[in-house]
Image (cartoon, rainbow, N blue to C red):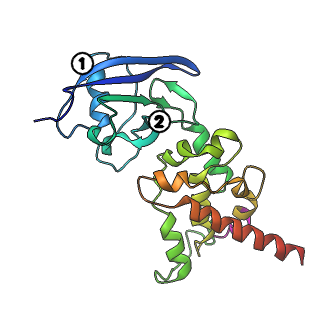
Amino acid sequence: MLDGPQTLSVSIWRGTGTTGAFQGFEVPRQGSQTVLDVVSWIQQNLDPTLTYRYACRVGMCGSCAMMVNGVPRWTCRTHVNKVDQGGALTIGPLRNLPVIKDLAADMDPFFEKWVKAEGLFHPARTRHEEVARVDPASEARRTADRAIECINCSVCYAACDTVAGNPDYLGPAALNRAWSVVNDERDAGRAEVLAAVSVSGGCHNCHSQGSCTRHCPNELSPLDSIAGLKRETARSFWRKGR
């Protein structure tokens, strides 16, 4: 038996680019129903033109992230009975990203900032040399590991008010990745990474509000990573000034 309303009043963003509006749907309420189940039911039973993105459905890939009642979430892991407001749901595309169509956001700006932050591995050895050995108990390895489980779902990016107010800001995911690279003992581009995150729009633009950490589905702390980058970029600056 279900407690409360037996149907859900669902408002879903429909449109492309900056043009669109919310459209209402009535959806049967079911036990253990997720928000992704709701979106899929609408697409399969009411409107086959509804556009959205998902892949694994089991909380691994992060591609089903959307705004649910104003909060960025993985919809496959978000149960309706924990987020509906009196039998009502409002579902939209991720904030701070362009909209391709309906619930599908354009991820290109998000990944472009990953590149700008130098969030890629800079090898110190060639493929012809022995593989570098890293002590799993080392402090640098433990620090890198704490940030490395990011799967680029962009929930933190959508949650970030600094991104909303400053389109040039690299964002928490890109900076979190940069922190992993800075602490990777095998990486040969530490100076390049610190330079990349020190520019306008870099780590020092973070206001430390913590929305990224609060909403991360993998319970990572981009806020801690950004604080680490702030410390290391400051140290690098003072070393150069000597």
Name which quarter of the figure residue 103 lies in. top left
Task: Measuring from the top left, give residue 141's x and y in whole percent.
Answer: 52, 76
23 left or right, relative to 223 = left
For the magenta stretch, what is the residue range?
187-192
Nearer to me, 95 or 58: 95
Q: Is residue 194 above or below residue 15?
A: below
Q: Which residue is mark 1?
A: 45
Camera sees residue 120: no
Name the element at disc 2: loop
Local packing at callout 1 (Cα closer than 10 Å; few below 14, some 14-19, many 20+) is few
Task: Measuring from the top left, give residue 172's x and y in whole percent.
Answer: 59, 53
Q: Nearer the viewer, mark 2 or mark 1?
A: 2
Task: Measuring from the top left, give residue 17's x and y in whole percent.
Answer: 57, 22
Name which quarter of the figure residue 239 lies in. bottom right
**Could you say which disc has been placed on residue 70 in the image?**
2
Q: Is residue 195 above or below residue 42?
A: below
Q: Is residue 43 magenta?
A: no
Which kind of residue does numbered mark 1 sit on? Answer: Asn
Q: Which residue shows up at 40% across the image and 45% down it?
A: 62
Nearer to me, 115 or 22: 22
Name which quarter of the figure residue 87 lies in. top left
Q: Is residue 104 above or below residue 119?
A: above
Q: Is residue 103 above or below residue 225?
A: above
**Could you say which disc has been placed on residue 100 in the image?**
none
160 left or right, relative to 76 = right
Which kind of residue does numbered mark 2 sit on? Answer: Gly
Please identify the quadrant where the N terminus is shown: top left
Looking at marks 2 and 1 on the same chain, the residue that comes earlier in the sequence is marked by 1
Q: Which residue shows up at 54% across the image and 38% down it?
A: 107
Name the element at disc 1: helix
Task: Measuring from the top left, give residue 30's x and y in whole percent.
Answer: 18, 32
